[in-house]
Amino acid sequence: MDWTAFSLSLKLSGATVAVLLIVGLLVARSLAWRRFPGKSMIEAIVALPLVLPPTVLGYYLLLFLGRRSPLGSAVESLTGETLVFSFGGLLIASVIYSLPFAVQPMLQAFESIPQGVREAAWCSGLSKWSTFWRIELPLARAGIVSGMALSFAHTMGEFGVVLMVGGNIPDETRTVSIAIFDKVQSFEEASAGSMSLVLLVFSLCVVSLVYTMNRNFSARVRG
């Protein structure tokens, strides 16, 4: 078992979830409550990674993050390092690739909150920020937890985008999925099997925990 690659995957997944918690809430709440021109296009762009092949998305991310791009050249001029084939670039790619897994459950949770609940909170003297913090977040908790867990598990198993953007640099971009691929290519079936089993059990535990937490939360709400 390549624990270095596994720990890097954990680090990448944790950082991705931390970013998506903020970005996902902003995007999901805006899509749930606001009406604006081009909303359908924004929703389609957010959902695009669900249907776009990882290699295609990885190719465009290479162009977006490469040293010839405005973002890539700006980062290189400031830090002396490139975004491509680095952990920073891998994080940006993972956030974009996992965005729909975070936004979709959050969006459904916010949309399920009746408008009358928010209006009643405002009439009671709560500000919009207090309403969001004390009313909307607790009611949308199940969707938020689901989005974060799905994003975490999805990032742990990323392969195509990781390989395209990060390559296979030990201790830098070599995640557990890349390590499994290397073992298969080297005909080290025992090592590939053990790592695959660990990743399978880990992902199953994460998803099972989410279902259990959401079931308990729904039971408390009904009670």
Image (cartoon, rainbow, N blue to C red):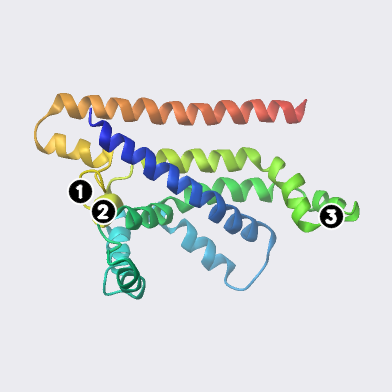
For the residues marked 2 and 1, what is the alpha-carbon distance in whole angstroms?
8 Å
Instruction: Report the Cα–Cα distance between label 1 and label 3.
Output: 52 Å
Quadrant in which the N terminus is drawn: top left
Picture layout, residue 214 above or below residue 29: above
Percent x, y for residue 186? 9, 35
Q: Which amino acid does label 3 sit on?
A: Glu
Q: What element carries label 3?
A: helix
The front one of 5 and 215 is 5
Where residue 166 is drawn, which disc sits there? 2
* Residue 119: image tag: 3
Question: Which residue is painted at 78% across and 51% down in the image?
Answer: 131
Q: Which amino acid does label 1 sit on?
A: Ile
Q: In this view, does 33 lie to the left or right of 17?
A: right
Mark 3 or mark 2, which has the lower sequence index? 3
Q: What element carries label 1?
A: loop
Is 73 or 37 nearer to us in this picture? 73
Q: Gap between marks 3 and 2, in whole Å?
A: 47 Å
Q: Residue at x 44, y 42 (%)?
A: 14
Most extreme residue toward the right, as rendered? 124
Q: Is residue 69 above or below residue 122?
A: below
Task: Between residue 37 and residue 9, name the one nearer to us.
Answer: 9
Query: CB under 8 Å between callouts 2 and 1?
Result: yes
Which three-letter amino acid code belongs to the residue tagged 2? Gly
Where disc 2 sits, the SS reads helix
Which residue is label 1 attached to?
169
Using the image, determine if residue 29 lies above or below residue 9: below
Q: How crowded is mark 1: few (under 14 residues within 10 Å), some or many (20 or more)?
A: some
